[in-house]
Amino acid sequence: GGSGDERHGHTFQVQEFRRPECKVSATMRTQQPVILGGVGVAAVSAKYYAGNVGLSGATADWVVSQSSGFFVPPGWTGKGFQWTAKDSAGSFRADAGSSDVKVKYQGTTDGGGEHVVAVACEANLVEPAGPVSVEL
């Protein structure tokens, strides 16, 4: 080893922790998976930490997306399997690309700080047939 005197310096700032002013939570009001003909209901709630009072008038952005099914068996090192409406029995696809359909909605929280969205899974609206997810 060397006998030289090595020095290193680093600078940093210590700032005060600031607690967020509000908390946001999301819940699915629908308990079971929604099938064709059903309605899925999701809610978002925003409340101030101080007093636990609802944050009214806040913007709520929702994204409802639909994508084809995709499955990779555990321990499988090959390509996965993707199902589409054209092949209800499942098909082997080398690319297994995404076929997502996304629709964006925007709402405003009510006086209690809540906004609710309901997604109807009707045959003429879900095209091609496949899984649907709601993002908050």
Image (cartoon, grey):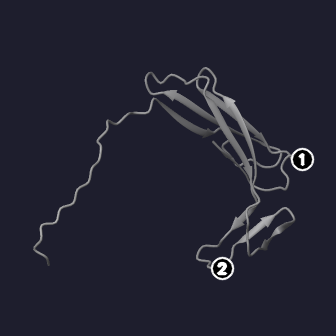
Which residue is rendered at x = 79% and y = 72% of the image?
91
Q: Residue furthest front?
A: 4
User: On screen, 95 above or below 51?
Assistant: below
Q: In which quadrant of the rendered view does residue 118 lie?
A: top right
Q: How many numbered markers are drawn? A: 2
Packing grade of label 1 (10 A; few <14, some 14-19, many >=20) is few
Given the image, on which type of amino acid does mark 1 rest?
A: Asn
- The mark found on residue 50 in the picture is none
Packing grade of label 2 (10 A; few <14, some 14-19, many >=20) is few
Given the image, on which type of amino acid does mark 2 rest?
A: Gly
Q: Nearer the viewer, residue 61 or 79?
A: 61
What secondary structure is marked by label 2? loop
Q: Position of residue 115 (x, y in %)?
A: 65, 30
- The mark found on residue 78 in the picture is 2
Q: Pointer 1: what residue?
A: 124
Q: In which quadrant of the rendered view does residue 26 lie?
A: top right
Whether residue 61 sits left or right of residue 35 in the image: it is: left
Q: Nearer the viewer, residue 30 or 135?
A: 135
